[in-house]
Structures are given as C-alpha cells and as structure tokens.
Amino acid sequence: MCGITGAVWTSSDRAVDQRTLERMTDSLTHRGPDDRAMYFQSLGQGSDDRSNGNQDQDRTRSSHTTNVGVGLGFRRLSIIDLATGMQPISNEDGTIRVIFNGEIYNYRELRQRLEGNGHRLRTQGDAETIVHLYEDEGPACFKYLRGMFAIAIWDGRLKKLILARDRLGQKPLFYSRQPKRLVFGSELKALLPVSGLDTQVNLSAIDSYLLYQYIPHPDTIYRGIASLPPGHLAIWQAGHESAESFEVQSYWSCPTQEKRQDKAVAVTQLQETLEQAVVLRMQSEVPLGTFLSGGVDSSLIAALMQKNSSQPIQTFSIGFRESEYDESKYAQQVARHLGTQHEAFVVQPEALTVLPDLIYHYDQPFADSSAIPTWYLSQMTKRQVTVALSGDGSDELFSGYDRYKAARFAANLDRIPGMQSFLAWPMWQRIPSDMSQRNALRRWKRFSQAMTLAPVARYMQWIGIFHDDQRAALYSEPFLEHLPQRDPLDFVSQYYRMFAKRDPVTRFALTDLLSYLPCDLNTKVDIASMSHGLEVRQPFLDHHVVELAAQMPNAWKLRWNRGKRILQEAFGHLLPPEIWARKKQGFGVPLDHWFRGPLRELTEQTLLGSAAAGRGLFEQAEVTRLVKDHVSGKFDNAYRLWSLLVLELWFQRWQPDFAI
C-alpha cells in the first residue's frame, strides 16, 4: 500500500522539474512512510536518471534522446516483499516501468503464469507481476488483476502512459490533462505543487456535494482535475511533433442481468468465494487484524479469518460514551464467541480537535461524519497492526440498508391507484413529530412527501442532504447565475438506467454499489486509514464476490423485511443468532448534540462570519435560519450544518481567497 504520483510532458513549457516531483511525492508521505523513490527523465535526455531512497539501485542507460519528459514518484508502505519490493519497478531492459498503490491478491497465481511464459521475475512482490503482465497483454492486463489498485505504467517504447483504477474504486487516482502534459496522483494534494493547473473551484461539484455529501467522479472540487472512475483506465500517448492522444475507457462493468441458478448451488459458491477472498487478503509480512463493530458484516469477516488462522486473530473496535452510537458490547460478544485477541478503544470523539486533520487529508469537501470514528479507529488500530480487514460493501451487495425496504414498499404502493395522492396529502406534514433524524414519524413524513417524484428523485429525497428546493433557497443569485445547467441527479441516474431489467431494490442497491460506495464509503476508509499508514482490505469487494452477488435475485437477500438473508443461510453457523438478528446500526457520531454544544461556537463563527458571507455562494439569511433552528431545537439540521461547515473550512484551508 503506497502513494503514487507523476507526470508526462512533450513541451519544455509544460515540464515538471525534479524538485517539483519531489514535492509531489513527499506530499504522500503519510500513505507510504517507509521509503521514497522516483524515476525522472527530462525532454531530450539521453539517459534515464533514477532518484531513490535506495541508493543501491542501478541506473538504466539509453542511447537515444526522447521527445517525452517523464516523472514517477512513489512512497512505500511495506506490506509484502519487504526486502525487494521497492518501486518504480521495470522490466529487464527498462522500457516499461510501473508504480502502483494497492494489493494484487492473485499475484502468486499470475507469477506462475508469467514464469511459464518465459519471464524472469527478480522480486517476490506483486508489483513486478503487473510489469510482465502488461508486456503480455497490453492495457487488457487489468482484467486479470484481483485486488485493489491505482496503477501507472510508463511504456517507453510507445511513449505511452496508462493509468488504471480498481473495479470498485477502493484506491483513488486523480489526474489533470492539459495540452502537452498529463499529471496524476493518489490524492489531489499531490498535483497541487505543479504550476499551471486549473485549480479554479468547480461550482457544479459544490452543487453535487450539497446533495450527496461527496463529490461524484469524475468531478473534483477543481475544474482542471478529474477523478478516474472505478473500473476505468486512461491512456495518454505522445505522437510526432509533440502531438498526443488521450482516452478514458472502461475495462470492467458490473453484471446487469439476473442469473438463473439453483439457490443451493449459489449458497455453496458464496461460501467458497467469500472465504477465498478473505484468505487472499490475509497475505501479509507485517502484523494483520480486522475491524470488528459487532455488526453482521465485520463479524462475518472476523469469523472467516479466525477459521483460517492457526492462532487467535487480532480484532479492533471503537466505543463511545453515548449508548445510541456505541456497539462495543456486541463486538466483545463476537470476539469471545470466536476467541479472538480483541482490543476495544473507548474514545470521546472531539470534532474540534480532529476537524483540521480531516480537512487537510480529505483534500476536497467530504461530509460523511462517520469519517470521524473511522479516523479514530484507524489511528488506534495502526498502533498494533499495519493491515486490517473490514466488512464494507455487504449492505450494497445483500440489501442491508433500511432504504432498500423503503424502495420496495414504495414500488408496491406505486401499483395502487390514487396512493401517491393520498401519501402526498399535506396534512401528513402538519403532524407534530420529534425532530430527531431517526424518529419514525419524521421518517414517514419524508417517505410520503417524496412519493410523487420519479424513482431516482424520490430515492435522493430520502437520502440526500440538501434537496432541490432546499438548495434553491440556499444559493445566492450570483451562484445560480454562474452554476452550469446540469442536473446533479444525472450521476446516479446513469447507473439506475444500467439495471433497468432488475427489480426496484436491486436497481438502487447496485446503483449505490457504483456510486455511493466508491465516492463515499471507499473514500472515507482510504483516506482515514492511509492518513495513519494503515492498509484496509475489503473482502466483500473482491470482484468475484461482487459479480456473484449482483446476479442473485433480491428475493434471496431481502425477505420478511430483513436483508442479508442469503448471507445468513451461507454463514449462519459462524456467528451467534443474536448478531444475525440485530438491527443495523450506523457508524456515526452525535452531530445533533455537538451543534448545540462543543461545535456551536465554531459553527456560528464560521458559517455566519464575514469570510463565508464574502464568498457570495449562499443566502446568509438562510444559513442563519438553519443554524438557529437547530440550536433552538426546532429542527434537526445536523447533516446540513456539517456539510456547510466542512465546505467553509475547506475554503479556509485550501482556497481562502475564493469569492464568486
């Protein structure tokens, strides 16, 4: 697990000098604290110069000059092949070089195949398999990789740079393409040392952020920087007389059709495939453990790890003083049942303390507040191990979220004539209800109010942060005038249309798999863990598991108002019955209380202060109303206030002079 960055250019006025490459690389030190290496070749240079943390590596010489400048930077977190696994790594004649962030879990299998084809591998790690697989397969090589990765391949023979990102977006990869130059990196901050990039604020990204709480790919907060979508590769190639080509293309797509299959056979396949995914992710030469919340997903991963370990595995959980947010007793129960070596961290999350770190490391506005407990859990887990497994992805694959029950209920109600008008009856909204986000009556009012909308708009009305009318009331006239005419719902709609032949629940679940999961959950876990030099592996996101689950009918997953039924059929014997029967509990923090307590002063100073007002984005009267209504207890605006607070703090850290 590492951090990668680099650039290619065909003009001296677009060159990235070696000092800039060093700054780009060192900005990712937290992702790879163990070592640093770079490969650098300037325009017209007759030799390939290597600058490395390891001074013993040879320099590769070439007898010709080049019309392409290349810089590759690498920060290493040592996991596998501690002795010889340094990057950039090349083929025998130095014409192909690879840097990558992530893990290739089937590298041993690939190694045997490559050696059978006549390749001679010098190292014992996974990176070198990519080099030789590319020699054999070209850009088609990525479909053979089983893992999580962001990869850059420099092909000096063809003057070609290939970037690729894993199928579900577990590892991030950003790039900026300009005439005669391409710059890339694992994080946005790795690109910022390069002069001449378009880092003007992307107003469409702000609009999407306030709906989703994240910025959807391929957009970023900067107009001139893009996020490579999951399951995609990008190819940049220099031509004659500084001409160049650039193309982004998909190399993987989630299965869209349901597969006719015997359920008993499918259960057996699920047992074998998920267990294999866990075993593959237990490969490590450094201490390894797993997150354990006490919910079904992390508990099942822990159970499969313990089943395949000759000694007690290490498990880690985090507890909070507020009982409604604390799952530690369930984690302890599972740990005792499995016989793991368990460590529970009890913390009092301090938003005021951790906020500056979150704003710095997440690079762009990101308002999933569960990043806070994930940050603490990663920080404390890293004290004991370097690799941890997690249960992310199960809810999307096996219909675990409550909103999928709502989607099924709504689809059934749509079939009843006149039901939409009944549910849209204004009197529903006048019934007094508790202000809490989790209050049943408030949730019913939100459900019924959205029933007149089309399915995608309805779904986002349930789970979105600022809805259309709320954003319209919030935005200033100058913001609306400068905002490009683009519907932010287009992002999820493109995936919803992909699964048009599936049932309503599966359509939304697989839409979440391709949108919410990579942009929110995987971003949250990657940044929180890598900020502490911790690698997190997610067995449910093994693409063999994903493809198997995606082709199952929803009736096997969501039945009698409970999700993950087929998981219980396949693995029920591994966990106590009460764990399977538990209601899902989110991994959250008490934002609603914080905004009336420890965050109140910061929120009022930040959102109602002159700096925020001077940006001209929002109607300050509306922002004031949101703050006052929450503080007074009139309404729970916690998630909206958190989104606005994170956005303004991001401006203060990264774009302090911005005004529309």
Image (tube, grey):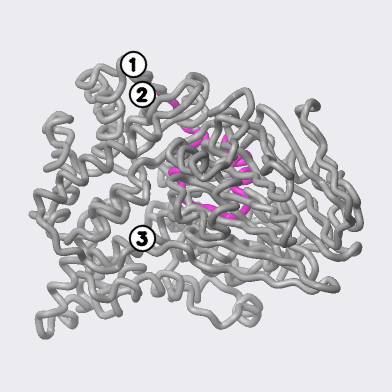
Query: x%, y% of residue 581?
Result: 13, 39
| Rendered residue at 64%/51% (across/down) | 152
Query: x%, y% of residue 234?
Result: 60, 63
Disc 3 to disc 2, C-alpha distance: 28 Å
Judge whether 113 appears above or below 398 on screen. above
Secondary structure at numbered mark 1 = strand
- Quadrant for the N terminus in the image: top right
| Rendered residue at 70%/52% (across/down) | 652
Q: Earlier in the sequence, mark 3 or mark 2?
A: 2
Question: Label 3 sits on what residue type?
Answer: Asp
Q: Can you tell which mark lies on residue 512?
A: 3
The quarter of the displayed image where residue 54 is located: top right
Q: Can you tell which mark lies on residue 656?
A: none
Check residue 538 for magenta coloring.
Answer: no
| Rendered residue at 35%/69% (across/down) | 461
Q: Is 540 or 531 nearer to us in this picture?
A: 540
Question: Is the residue under label 2 in contact with that under label 3 (CB below 8 Å)?
Answer: no
Magenta segment: 346-375
Question: Is the residue under label 1 in contact with that under label 2 (CB below 8 Å)?
Answer: yes
Check residue 350 for magenta coloring.
Answer: yes
Question: Label 1 sits on what residue type?
Answer: Gln
The quarter of the displayed image where residue 426 is located: bottom left
- Quadrant for the C terminus in the image: bottom right
Question: Label 2 sits on what residue type?
Answer: Thr
Q: Can you tell which mark lies on residue 315?
A: 2
Q: Can you tell which mark lies on residue 341?
A: 1
Secondary structure at numbered mark 2 = strand
Q: Is residue 459 left or right of residue 362?
A: left
